[in-house]
Structure formats: structure tokens, C-alpha cells
Image (cartoon, rainbow, N blue to C red):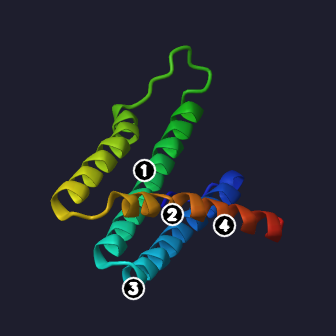
Amino acid sequence: MLPADPSNETGIRASRRISRLTLILGFAAAIAVFALKSHPAGIGVALGTILAWLNFRWLDQALIALERQATAQQGSPAARVPFQIYVKIAGRYVLMAAAIYVTFHYFAVPVISLIVGLLALGAGALVGSIYEVVSGS
């Protein structure tokens, strides 16, 4: 992870919490589906969870890089965004589409289980937000 900026410590902690909760909730759901439904469906939930986590991490890294660039170029008439940021933002969708296609087409994993795994990010963000409200952070 990036070095802690005292002015954004709460945001960094929230980002880490959402990242951890996405994996915890997603893999817990994958284990439950694996045991109660079917092995391919459980694997699909686990793969969807991994894709959701990667998507979140890459988006988080791209936004942090954009923030740093904006701060560094403050007052400049023509701000320049590095090409790597565009690659990370677009690459998230390319990776997800390719992984979903290959998993569904070649490994016969139910597509609905992949979608359930992708929803782990929403669950992680929801639980993380509830924690922030309850703890008063």
C-alpha cells in the first residue's frame, strides 16, 4: 500500500477495511455456496470475489495516482495525466471481461456465481460504511 498521508489517514484505513471485508465476505460466501450448492458455483463465487477485489485495488491505486498528479500540477495551466493511469482504469474492465468470458466459456462455471462474487465488493463497502458510522470514525 502507499505511504500514509496524515491528512488522508481515515480514507486509507477505510480503503484497507473495504479491501479486507471484500475478501472475507466473498470467500465466506464461496465456502457456503461450495458446500451447499455445487463445487463449480463455489469456485465461481471465489473467482468473482477475486475479480471484485482486483477491480477495487486498481481503481484505488489509479485514484491515488490521479490525486498525486493533481496536487503536483496545482496551478499549472495544462495538467498532464500519465498513460499508466489510463491503462489501470481501462485495464480493470478488460481483465474482468476476459476472466469472466474464459471462466464461463471454458470452465463451465455458472455466470450467476461469478456475479455473486463480484457483489462481494458492494457487501464489503456496505459493512465497512456501517462500521464507520457505528464507530464514529
Residue at numbered disc 1? 58
Badge nearest the viewer, 4 or 1 = 4
Ranked by sequence position, the earlier of labels 3 and 4 is 3
Residue 126: quarter of image:
bottom right
Ranked by sequence position, the earlier of labels 2 and 3 is 3
Q: Position of residue 69 (x, y in %)?
A: 51, 34
Q: Judging from the image, what secondary structure is the residue with disc 3 in? A: helix
Badge nearest the viewer, 3 or 4 = 3
Q: Quadrant of the C terminus?
A: bottom right
Q: Position of residue 114 (x, y in %)?
A: 37, 60
Marks 2 and 3, Cα distance to the nearest angstrom?
18 Å
Q: Judging from the image, what secondary structure is the residue with disc 1 in? A: helix
Residue at numbered disc 4? 127
Left or right, 12 with reference to 34: right
Foreground residue, 103 or 9?
Answer: 103
Marks 2 and 1, Cα distance to the nearest angstrom?
16 Å
Whether residues under marks 4 and 1 lie with C-beta atoms below 8 angstroms apart, the answer is no
| Mark 1 residue crowding within 10 angstroms, few (<14) / some (14–19) / many (20+) | some
Q: Judging from the image, what secondary structure is the residue with disc 4 in? A: helix
Amino acid at circle 1? Trp
Residue at numbered disc 2? 120
Residue at numbered disc 3? 35
Q: Judging from the image, what secondary structure is the residue with disc 2 in? A: helix
Q: Identify whether 34 is placed above or below 95.
A: below
Residue 40: quarter of image:
bottom left
Left or right, 133 with reference to 109: right
Residue drawn at x 42%, y 52% as measured from the top left: 55
Marks 1 and 3, Cα distance to the nearest angstrom?
31 Å
Amino acid at circle 2? Ala
Q: Identify whether 129 is placed above or below 90.
A: below
Ranked by sequence position, the earlier of labels 1 and 3 is 3
